[in-house]
């Protein structure tokens, strides 16, 4: 029996791009513009501000799709296509400007491994903190603690502050915690791009296992081998819109043909 | 071995047919109040944040947690020397050092907490751009973390009270109410500042100056009888409303040390100001929280 786990309808996110000269509004700008408002009203456009008006930018627009239970949907597209924005909206990190999305079932997001790791805290302390950030109950974390440490292979260093860890050790510990997520729906952003080949193989294996065990996964990557290996369907995003959604191979072909222009000048 | 590869939690048939979505993501409209219930739902994370703050503050320091005591005691000696000995300010019938320590205990909690709360959103940017939780957890966890400091200082204030009065005071029963008022004022001011600072960094830059002015507008190191000499009686309630810490310090010091009784007007005004700050701050924070990640 199929059941929809993620339903997205006409989702859109608009950003205001700050014009040049202005990184973010200061109180001074605000006071000046407030002071000018009555004058502007009286004299029409007589008083022009020095600053150009901010411009709109739709990072994501009119995006609709569904993900069924047990399905792995890959999201591919060039940088700036809106992949991360989509994942942020579905993870409730920021609100959409328009449209709706419905998440059925307990959802967890993994947009970065080692979210909230604090350099001054020890491995042990960070494991507990990170578990809480990922929404895993404390009791569960304490119960699984030795398992996590074994998985990371860092038992000798577990009471060392993570600022003294190598980047490989850091990622291994972080991923060991992330692998404890046990929600039905998983949103995963590019996290597998970090770490060495052995780590990547291990983490992609873990994702495969998660999908086989019936979890619903929304997954972005620039690695087409990974996409082919674990996704059932694939969506191509470009400039904030859905270009294609469906068969994985067709999606990759569509993406590649779009991205790699045919050589026009033969190489001599 | 990991949970990701364990079978997904099975749902029953009835749950599958029940198409009510667990979570609806959409652009929210209208006025909302900050997610107070979320503090309870996410209480484990709330405590972890507070625990992290306390742990990190004294890491790699030799004296560690002793610093909680060193800071207010050093301040007490500075003020006792300047205002107690050199200037010779009155201290409402208790030794000046105790008098100043009582005021400093409350003021320091307020000032250091709202300062930390004001940068709690942008200071945790790496977190709030990567994971969802009610953003109110961040400023509130700061309040809990600094409450540890206050809990260590409070017994010293009580000992000073016993030394000054020679007995245990009945007014100690009022201390929980005084602390509740302190927390309410701190919460109201702190959520306003944290939401404002996420939009305008000017807040963080102006705050030290404002707090220094506030320190001298609040009878921390001098008696409110001196304030009454400068400000006429009819203006006092207004001053107490604008600066709710005036009432908080008065009621706390009286309760803990047995100094002059607080004026009813300043305590009532502090309560009103706290309510107003929480009501408006709660709405403003909720409004900011929705898209804070885009602005920060």
Image: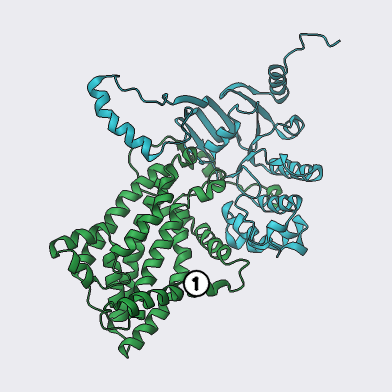
In front of the other: B233 or B183: B233
Chain assignment, label 1: B
Image height of A221 relative to B233, above or below: above
Horizontal side of B52 relative to A199 (left or right) equals: left
Q: Residues within 10 Å of mark 1 (few under 14, many from 20)?
A: some
Is B259 displayed left or right of A207 in the figure?
left
Chain A: colour as depicted:
cyan
Q: Which residue is mark 1?
A: B68
Where does residue B102 sit, x and y in percent of width and height? 35, 75
Colour of chain B as rendered: green
Residue at the (55%, 64%) spot, across then down: B57
Q: Position of residue A244 (x, y in %)?
A: 63, 21
Name the element at disc 1: helix
- A47 or B119: nearer the eye? A47
Most extreme residue toward the right, as rendered?
A: A268
Q: Is residue A139 left or right of residue A208?
A: left
Above or below — where is B262 with respect to B243? below
The residue under the point 35% across, 55% down is: B210
Residue lying farthest top? A265
Along the line of sight, the residue nearer the viewer: B172 or B30: B172
Q: Residue at x 52, y 30 (%)?
A: A8
Q: Is residue B39 visible?
A: no
In this figure, what is the number of numbered marks? Answer: 1
């Amino acid at each position: 029996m199929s059941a929809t786990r993620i339903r997205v309808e006409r989702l859109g996110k608009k950003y205001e791009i700050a014009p040049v000269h202005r990184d973010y509004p200061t109180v001074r700008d605000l006071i000046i513009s407030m002071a000018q408002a009555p004058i502007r009203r009286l004299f029409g456009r007589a008083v022009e501000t020095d600053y150009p008006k901010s411009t709109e930018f739709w990072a994501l627009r009119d995006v609709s799709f569904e993900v069924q239970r047990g399905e792995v949907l890959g999201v591919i597209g060039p940088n700036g296509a809106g992949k991360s924005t989509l994942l942020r909206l579905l993870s409730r990190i920021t609100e959409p400007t328009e449209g709706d999305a419905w998440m059925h079932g307990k959802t967890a997001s993994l947009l970065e491994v080692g979210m909230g790791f604090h350099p001054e805290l020890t491995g042990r302390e960070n494991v507990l903190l990170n578990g809480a950030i990922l929404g895993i109950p404390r009791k569960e974390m304490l119960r699984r603690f030795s398992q996590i440490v074994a998985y990371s292979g860092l038992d000798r260093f577990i009471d060392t502050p993570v600022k003294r860890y190598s980047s490989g050790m850091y990622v291994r510990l972080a991923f060991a915690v992330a692998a404890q997520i046990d929600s039905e729906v998983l949103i995963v952003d590019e996290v597998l791009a970090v770490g060495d080949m052995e780590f990547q193989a291990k983490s992609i294996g873990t994702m495969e296992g998660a999908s086989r065990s019936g979890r619903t996964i929304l997954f972005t990557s620039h690695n087409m081998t990974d996409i082919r290996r674990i996704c059932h369907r694939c969506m191509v995003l470009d400039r904030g819109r859905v270009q294609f959604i469906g068969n994985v191979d067709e999606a990759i072909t569509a993406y590649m043909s779009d991205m790699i222009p045919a050589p026009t000048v033969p190489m001599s | 071995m990991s949970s990701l590869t364990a079978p997904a939690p099975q749902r029953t048939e009835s749950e599958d047919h029940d198409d009510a979505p667990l979570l609806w993501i959409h652009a929210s409209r209208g006025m909302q109040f900050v997610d107070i219930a979320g503090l309870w739902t996410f209480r484990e994370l709330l405590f972890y944040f507070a625990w992290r703050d306390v742990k990190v503050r004294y890491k790699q320091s030799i004296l560690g947690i002793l610093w909680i005591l060193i800071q207010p005691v050093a301040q007490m000696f500075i003020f006792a020397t300047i205002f107690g000995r050199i200037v010779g300010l009155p201290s409402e019938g208790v030794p000046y050092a105790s008098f100043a320590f009582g005021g400093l205990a409350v003021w320091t909690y307020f000032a250091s907490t709202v300062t930390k709360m004001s940068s709690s959103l942008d200071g945790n940017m790496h977190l709030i751009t990567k994971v969802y939780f009610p953003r109110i957890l961040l400023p509130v966890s700061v309040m809990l973390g600094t409450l540890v400091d206050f809990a260590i200082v409070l017994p010293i204030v009580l000992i000073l009270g016993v030394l000054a009065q020679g007995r245990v005071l009945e007014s100690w029963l009022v201390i929980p109410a005084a602390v509740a008022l302190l927390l309410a004022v701190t919460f109201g001011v702190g959520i306003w500042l944290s939401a404002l600072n996420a939009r305008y960094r000017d807040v963080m830059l102006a705050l030290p100056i404002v707090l220094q002015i506030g320190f001298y507008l609040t009878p921390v190191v001098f008696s409110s009888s001196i304030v009454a000499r400068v400000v006429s009686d009819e203006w006092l309630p207004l001053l107490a409303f604008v600066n709710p810490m005036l009432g908080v310090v008065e009621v706390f010091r009286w309760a803990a040390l047995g100094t002059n009784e607080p004026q009813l007007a300043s305590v009532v005004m502090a309560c009103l100001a706290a309510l107003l700050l929480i009501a408006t701050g709660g709405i403003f924070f909720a409004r900011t929280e929705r898209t804070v990640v885009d602005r920060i």
